[in-house]
Amino acid sequence: MPKPKLAIYWAASCGGCDIAILDIETKILDVAAFFDVIFWPCAMDFKYDDVRAMPDKSITLTLFNGSIRSSENYEIAQLLRAKSVVLCAFGSCAAEGGIPGLANFHSKEAICEYVYKQSPSLEPGNGTMPQPEVRAPEGLVRIPVLWNTVRSLDQVVDVDYVIPGCPPQSDQIAAVVAAVIDILSNGKPLPPKGTVLGATEKTCCDECKRTRNVKKIKGFIRPFEHLTDPNVCLLEQGIVCMGPATRAGCGAKCVSAGVPCRGCYGAPTNVRDQGAKMASALASVIDSTDPEEIERILDSIPDPLGTFYRFSLAESTLRRTQV
Amino acid sequence: MAKVNIKIDGHPIEVEKGSFILEAAKALGISIPTLCYYPHMTPYAACRICAVEIRDGKGWSKIVTACNYPVWDGMEVLTTTPRVLNARRVNLEMLMSQCAPVPVLQELAREFGIDKPRWGTGEDTCILCGLCVRICDEVVGAHALAFSDRGIHRRVATPFDDTSSDCILCGACASVCPTGHITMEDIDQRTVIHRDLTLGPNAAISLPFRQAVPNVPRIDPQRCIHFTTGGCGICSQVCPKECIHYDDVDTFEEIEAGAVIVATGFDNFDPTPLKQYGYGRYANVITAEEFERMNNAAGPTGGHVVLENGQEPRSIAIIHCVGSRDENHHSYCSRVCCMYALKFAHLVKEKTNAEVYQLYIDLRSFGKGYEEFYQRILDEGVNVIRGRGAEVIPSGNRRKDEGPLLVQCEDTLIGRFREIPVDMVILCTALEARRDAKETGRKFNISVGADGWFIEAHPKLAPVSTSTDGIFLAGTCQGAKDIPDTVAQGGAAAAQAMKLLCLGEVLLDAAYAEIDETYCSGCRLCNDLCAYSALEFDEAKKVSRINPALCKACGTCVAACPAGAITGRHFTDDQIYAQIEGMLT
Amino acid sequence: MSFEPKIIGFLCNWCSYTGADLAGTARMKYPANLMSIRVMCSGRVDPGFVLDAFRRGADGVLVCGCHPGDCHYVDGNHKCMRRMPLTRRIMKGMGIDPARLRLEWVSASEGARFREIVSEFTEQLRRMGPLELKEIEFDPALEGAHHA
């Protein structure tokens, strides 16, 4: 019997997800032993045409990381969807847009303008903008078209499962891999479509060791402004921690290191818009009934939109800034 | 203490050695006249009216003062011998040579048959009994009074005849003075009537009011001499049942109750800020409450309607809507003033010959029999002027003869500006919510309206209930209302409370919020949001919980829950999002 | 035909919904542009509702609660009072004019005031024009296109 086929792809991503997969250490050998890795651009040189040549549904499992930012990302997402039995959005970017999704606060033009014309690191006088088509002596060269709006994977193709996290924690990946091997080798039924794997139904607070009390907030601060008590809930100390509105699974690593949760594991099951929900929760516990004072306290939230929607902007209700 | 046996007018009695004759006589019910004696103070024997004759049974006899002569064994006391009566008469005549007009001396003079004192009649009123000096020293402990000068110049005075800073204004000297020589006056040497018209009692120990339940006196430590100087303590000395305990303190009792009726009442609007009416500046501008107090037969004027100077008023203006129906103060109608103002007019007409002017915006005689009463007032000749009282000013020289105060108003029925000279102005002050209503509301989870009154659960269908089950409203804490309405609401509240208690169980609304523990991680953001304390934290399981019996289904925690763990039954997220979708597609 | 804005109104059960009812029973006419959703308390209004309404095509959102201090649930409206300014900040960040979200306190007796608020808000939105949100739904044909 041939080995099940595994594909791992990176779209608009940083490569952290791929590293996280390698971080499962010796278990990667189980993966290599059990699966036939037929596509993993980050690790080896594969050609898109090789994948195109494969029959539909011939890849057992595809772990897709990175958001959909360009025509190339979209094309490969469609391709892998067609070739895969199970397509899994792997990591925050694929699941909900992730950090690249923050580009949705700007227009594509504004970003290109800065990157290719204004950035202080540019060579002076070189204002070349990438063109989709360039006629070179060798012939017509095409590069993928950058999209104006960053999309999550499930917005462009049908997704079976989600493994959240930026990146997903290696122990969670190892557990998922073990479960997949178990299912495939013992003929067990797959979990229902849409299941979030490698995470729980609780929120980050569930894994946070800090003690929590009732909350009344008179003002917000940034972590460096104040020596925080390592045993008390960061939110109670005035630091915007996304933990309450973020799915658990990471082991609350950031908060245990004194850094507020940034929300990478995404919205909990019943929350539609992580940012709006956090805003609702935070505003509720502001300790004031005076409109002016409320405004002052809200002013003290550092970068509210970037904080509330750091990972989920592309998947949020409004998806992007209207420009 | 050793006992001794004595006889008074032939009656034997055993008394403590060293006690005084007067006390023994009192115990036997034998009356001996006194002027300078006061129980619980050292006897002073200044007036010498208590003269008695003592004998040793062996032929020796002597006239002594009963108040301070100690008894000895075998003493025989005689109180009515010609020698005794003569001694008293002589002493009385000597007192009258100084202070003839004093009523208490006049009475004694009649008793002793003195028509014309032999040494003439003096016009003074102080008999130098020393009661005032002694009470100030011994009881009050203020030491503000003393005798000064000697001989015929001897008198009671404060040091250097100046206003004494030691005086605590307790009035004990005036109350104990047998001749009325000492009176309480204010610094302006003006007799004060209205100033005493406080609703509460003036004494330091008193019943709060006549109908108080429980009907027992209590001490006001701010007024009590014992609490201010450490002296006095007279009430505990005279109380035969030893009920006075100065060291009693307030105690807080916890009562477990199945229902609470909040009936905290109202405050009276203070008309001082309404400068145009001159309350506080003109003594004869008084509030309705003060008039009511004056009108009380048990009040300071014995129920007589009098001016500050004690004279009967010739004319009275009653100004309605003081603080009510006034955008600067309370926009609502206080509901009771029209009718009590009519009642005042009726009472004034009954008790005096004064002319009465009612200055009203609208006369609201809405209740049963009220309109008939209004007609009756009109028949009694009360002047009813439609127009808000604009200003009360002193008459100056203009119409002084008719009344020292001029009430200005626009009579809107005749369309003219009027000035009405009156002696007295009664202000019908607004009923307003109690100052601490907000605090009380918070305590009982009752909503407080913008005007300060407690908000009922529904203005028509649940007028005595509140948004918190088991807490009911009665009376003016919910809004201005008159006595019949208050009684009705009180009855309804009691019935509602009884219903709860009799049922023994509570029906819950199906709409409430619930927490799914699968999703709750105990972040505790919701914990402080509930006004009804329905949210509690389970320390063991590290999840928050909602007590459905306390939840009122407002949904605040549902919207706030960052984990999406709280569902507002009947108003779920899914239902509301579906409504948004349905409306916009 | 002139533009008719679509307004979603979240009205609290005790004050504002009753106030709207009063406007109705008193035969006060207000623009039919408002579509009301009854919530028990303005404290139930989640910023997510507001954003969702805009996403689905509302041109304006009106949130009405009891006057501060008059809340049937003691202080539910205070929570709303804190959430809406933050919601406006999110709107602003998302490129939606914050004036399209209105928070008003309407008591049960203020039927006339309710009518005025709705009329005035409708007129304001008419002047502001329709809210056209772009690029929410994925459309492969448009994604690569440059914006003008």
Image (cartoon, coloured by chain):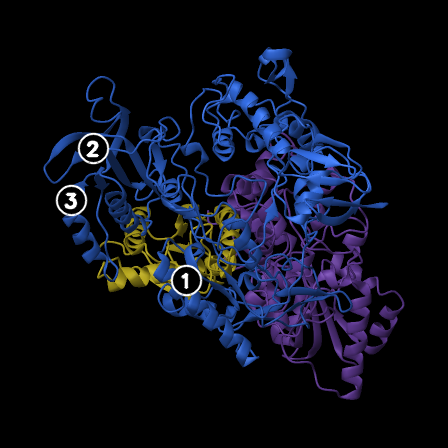
Chain colours: A purple, B blue, C yellow
Which residue appears at 64% of the width and 67% of the height?
A: B256
Q: Is residue A306 above or below residue A28?
A: above
Q: Which residue is mark 2?
A: B409
Q: Is residue B445 above or below residue A51?
A: above
Mark 1 secondary-structure assignment = loop
Q: Are marks 3 and 2 on the same chain?
A: yes
Q: Which comes sooner in the sequence, label 3 or label 2?
A: 3
Q: Is residue A2 visible?
A: no
Q: Which residue is mark 3?
A: B381
> Dot 3, how many residues are within 10 Å of its Cα: few (below 14), some (14-19), or many (20+)?
some
Chain of the residue displaying label 1: C
- Residue A99's spot in the image, x, y percent? 65, 52
Mark 3 secondary-structure assignment = loop
- Quadrant for the C terminus of chain B, please: bottom left
Chain of the residue displaying label 2: B
B495 and B87: which is toward the camera? B87
Q: Nearer the viewer, mark 1 or mark 3?
A: 3
Q: Which residue is mark 1?
A: C14
Which residue appears at 79% of the width and 87% of the height?
A: A186
> Dot 2, how many residues are within 10 Å of its Cα: few (below 14), some (14-19), or many (20+)?
many
B10 and A112: which is toward the camera? B10
Q: Amino acid at mark 1?
A: Trp
- In space, the residues marked 1 and 3 are separated at their CA atoms by 49 Å
Chain of the residue displaying label 3: B
- Residue A222's spot in the image, x, y percent? 69, 41
- Quadrant for the N terminus of chain B, please: top right
- Residue B564's spot in the image, x, y percent? 60, 66
Answer with left or right where residue B400 lies relative to residue A44.
Answer: left
Q: Is residue A49 visible?
A: yes
